[in-house]
Every structure is written in structure tokens, then in C-alpha cells.
Image (spheres, rainbow, N blue to C red):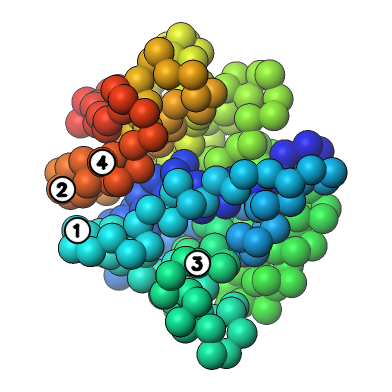
Amino acid sequence: MNYRHHFHAGNFADVLKHALLVQLVRGLQRKDKGFLYLDTHAGRGAYDLAAAAFGDTLTRRPEWPEGIGRLWSLPDLPPALTEYVDMVRAFDRTLGPAGTESVTSIAPQFYPGSPNLVRALARPQDRLALCEKHPEECAALRTELGGAARTGIHEMDGYAALRSMLPPPEKRALVLIDPAFEAQDEFAQIAGGLREALRRFSSGVYAIWYPLTERARVDAFFDELRILSLPPTLVVELSIAGENSSLKLKGCGLVVLNPPWQFDGATQAWLPVLARALAQDAGGGVSQRWLVPE
Ligand SMILES: C[S@@+](CC[C@H](N)C(=O)[O-])C[C@H]1O[C@@H](n2cnc3c(N)ncnc32)[C@H](O)[C@@H]1O
């Protein structure tokens, strides 16, 4: 395994994904009935941001200062972003040694992964299934959340979980598919996994993160998705730089199948603020469109 999420934790891509994830959970929680949160690529759940500055052999430029770092002390954020940043702040305070409030008010020291964010929001009737294939990351996740209520931690392939864990007994689910994109055929694996998942459970809410390195690859992915007879599907995309920028990762997006009611309208209120806060080069911005209309 080459990919280590701790190098990327809290970067602009995590910020977009996690701010949207919090709102997706809130959307599902408008109904009292509990749901399954299935995280197919869960990671280790908690990240020490100091570790982001050290590679295996060389020092690295951490990515979080251009992500959560940019929002940390920004005043007057819209409510959805305030909710997300407050959750990161609460997590940071819990892990930091007592008395570090003055340090954490300047910059975060710890950053929560998707499992910890959802765990913090989960109600007694909600259930978490967290899948992580890599033993070391999974062991760290188990240390982090192993004792948590109604939370299962599974060292397994997340795509296999789409077959074995769906449909859930609750008949409601939010599924986050957040791969590392190490594999050349990751987009094809996602499409294959989704095909299986939809066959078993077409009414689930599925959120799929993707990187925006080359527009053509993303368009080809959307073409693959369109063949699947998708339910209503929204695409939210953030570019931190224009197409001609020399940045390798120019942006990222989240494809959301069966988004909760009025999710698209609500996000329109804060996505432009986020895009302005996270821009790194000219030509960035945010877009939201229906791949398959409601
Ligand atoms: C982008 S990170 C996940 C970050 C996490 N979802 C979050 O938001 O905090 C991707 C994770 O997927 C794991 N992984 C890679 N291939 C996998 C697979 N086939 N099944 C499950 N996990 C996998 C990697 O070890 C890595 O921890």
C-alpha cells in the first residue's frame, strides 16, 4: 500500500467531502427511523496533522493548511460550514492534551476521518459499518472506535461490502464510497460495485468521492454511471484551480445517488463560500448539477 490518508487529512478534498457528509447525515436524520452508515473505505478514523509533514524518508508539505486550515479562523461562515468546523474543533479538543485550547484556536492538531464525524452525529437508532482493507489502518480504526455503540469495524474489501451488507435490515442507508484511487481501474471498480449495490438496494443514498485530475477521465466515469439506470443523481464539484493550472489535483467531486430532499438547494447556500475560501489558482469554482434528474 502506498496510499496513506494521513498525508491528505484535512485537505480541501476532505473539507468538501466531510462538509457534505455531515449534511447528508442530517438529511437522513430528518426521519426518526434509524439507518445504516456504510463506509466502504473508512481509513483510520483519526489523523494527527503533525504526521502529515513527514513522509517515509523526506519531509513533505502538509495539505491541511490549504484545507481545514483556511476555514479554521474564518469568521461568519454559513451554518452548514460552521457545523462542520465546530465538529472538527470538538474532535481536535478531545484528542489534544488538556490545556491546548490556545494552540488549537490558531490551528488544528488533529482531524477526524469520516467514521468519527458520523459517529459523533449518530443517534441510538443509527448503525455504522466501517470497512477498511489495510490491516494497519484497520487496527488504528479499531483502536479509535472499537468500543463505540452500534459500530462494526471490518477488515475487508469495501466493494465486497456493497454485496454482503446490502440491503440493510433497517431498509435505509447512507453509503460513502471514498477510495484511494491507487488502482488504475478504480472508476471501473466503483461502477461495478454500484451496479451490484443498486441491484440489491436501489433506494439507498450513495455518495462517491472522485478526484478531478483530468476532466476526460471524470466524463468517462459519468458515462459508465449513466448505463446503470441510476436513481436521481446529483454531482457536486469543487475546483480549486482552472483546467490549465499546473496543480495535479485541480478539484474533486461527490456523486450523490438519491440525495435527501432539498439537499441540492441547501448546499447552494454555502458551496460558493467554500469555493472562495479554498481557491488555490485562477479559474476554480463550484458546480452542482443533476446527472439524472429528480
Ligand atoms: C481516502 S481514504 C478514506 C478516508 C476516509 N473515508 C475519510 O473520509 O476519513 C481511502 C482508504 O481506503 C483504504 N482502501 C484502499 N482500498 C480499499 C478497498 N478495496 N476496500 C477497503 N478499503 C480500501 C485505504 O487504505 C485508505 O485508508
Please give left or right for residue 178 compared with residue 256 in the image. right
Mark 2: which amino acid?
Ala
Label 3 near label 4: C-beta < 8 Å?
no
Mark 3: which amino acid?
Pro
Whether 195 is drawn above or below 18: the answer is above
Q: Position of residue 278 (x, y in %)?
A: 35, 42
Among the two numbered marks 1 and 3 on one chain, the one whose residue lies closer to the N terminus: 1
Please give left or right for residue 194 compared with residue 75 in the image. right
C-alpha gap between disc 1 and disc 3 = 20 Å
Residue tagged 1 = 78
Among the two numbered marks 1 and 4 on one chain, the one whose residue lies closer to the N terminus: 1
Neighbour tally class for label 4: few under 14, some 14-19, many 20 plus, Cα within 10 Å: few
C-alpha gap between disc 4 and disc 3 = 21 Å
Mark 1: which amino acid?
Pro
Q: Position of residue 228 (x, y in %)?
A: 44, 19
User: Which quadrant, please, contains the C terminus?
Assistant: top left
Residue tagged 2 = 269
Neighbour tally class for label 2: few under 14, some 14-19, many 20 plus, Cα within 10 Å: few
Res. 108 mark: 3
Neighbour tally class for label 1: few under 14, some 14-19, many 20 plus, Cα within 10 Å: few
Q: Position of residue 282 (x, y in %)?
A: 31, 25
Circle 2 — which element? loop
